[in-house]
Amino acid sequence: MYEMFESELAKAFDQLPADASRLFHGRGHCFEGLEFVNVDWFSPVVWVVMYGDVDEPVFVRLCDIVKTQAERIPGVDAVLVQHREKGKSVQDVIYGDMPDACVAHEAGESYALTFGRNQNIGFFLDAKPARQWVRENAEGKRVLNLFAYTCSFSVAALAGGAQSVVNIDMAKSALATGKVNHKLNKFDGARVSFLPHDVFRSTRKLAKYGPYDLIICDPPSRQKGSFEADKDYTRLIGKLEPMLAEDAQIMALLNAPYLDEDFLPDIFAQKMPSYQYVERLAQREDFPESDNQCCLKMQLFMPKASST
């Protein structure tokens, strides 16, 4: 187990990219015995996350392996380790010094990271293919970004030439980081709106901002009091049609291993029969998965008349 971890990490450290990337994806169940650990690269910081009840000797050994790799590569300023267990998370710096500010780089864009504030750091690497699709297809479009979190899809849409973006999320702190992301990328505030509201209670207000040529749905899979994918996604899709412009596209994301890739197409068939499932975007290569039903689903839907 340790030899495999060290070998995979060494290969990844030997070719560190400029953009944010995953150096080791244990959660994809492709590396036996290491399903509890991921290692990410946010230049100049290495970010290690371990999940669940990890024995202390195992935890220490894996940290030592990461630290050894970091020490041999110029440009690595710090290694941070977060241990998530039973809904709690603890973070430690095991190498170097934490920079005052850190960002994720992707496709020429910058996204603020919030190490140490919350369990999540403000940027999800696995959604890169969806951001790329938005970047390539947003030109001239009016975009609605539901469950916007820190607004990475908004930044990608504006980078792709979107006419306007409306971001909505009930987490004010996440939207505050989203505003920082727009400033980092020098996007005009006149083209973007930030609404700190509950999506389900704001559909009439959202409709007034519309209609939209592209709607992005990226809700949490299980967030108590906010969204439970298995029961709330149906309700969400049922509210979209009045907001849509002619030939509007919908990008829907689902990060729920317990729900397969037919889950969203089945909901659209029931709630929006005028729309059909077009494609599922491929997972990024540095996220190897033993079962592609368990990873992030990024699925595109279009009106039946325009997708044939």
Image: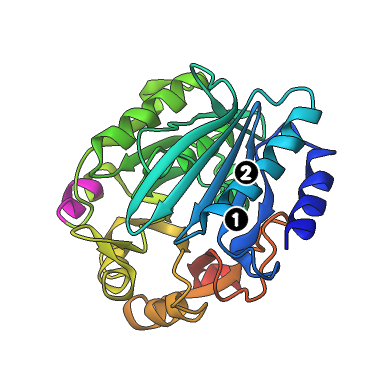
Under circle 2, the secondary element is helix
* Residue at 45% from the left image edge and 32% from the top image edge: 115
Give x and y (percent) for residue 26. Answer: 63, 60
Check the image and report above or below for 14 versus 281.
above
Check the image and report above or below for 42 versus 124.
above
Residue 184: numbered disc: none
Crowding around mark 1 (Cα neighbors within 10 Å: few <14, some 14 to 19, many 20+) is: few
* Residue at 82% from the left image edge and 45% from the top image edge: 10
Check the image and report above or below for 114 versus 211.
above
**As drawn, is 299 to the left or to the right of 96?**
left
Q: Mark 1 points at which residue?
A: 58
Report if residue 85 is visible in the image. yes
Outermost residue toward the front in this view: 57
Check the image and report above or below for 118 versus 236.
above
Give x and y (percent) for residue 100. Answer: 49, 16
Magenta: main secondary structure equals helix
Residue closest to the eye, 72 or 126: 72
Q: Quadrant of residue 48?
A: top right
- Verify whether residue 305 appears in magenta: no
Q: Are marks 1 and 2 in contact (CB under 8 Å)?
A: no
Q: Where does the C terminus fall, quadrant-wise?
A: bottom right
Which amino acid type is shown beneath numbered disc 2?
Cys
Which amino acid type is shown beneath numbered disc 1?
Val
Give x and y (percent) for residue 19. Answer: 69, 35
Q: Quick one: label 1 or label 2, which is nearer the N terminus? A: 1
Q: How far apart are marks 1 and 2 (CA)?
A: 9 Å
Q: Mark 2 points at which residue?
A: 63
Give x and y (percent) for residue 75. Answer: 74, 23
Q: Which stretch appears magenta? A: 201-206
* Residue at 47% from the left image edge and 61% from the top image edge: 253
Residue closest to the eye, 169 or 277: 169
Q: Where does the N terminus fall, quadrant-wise?
A: bottom right
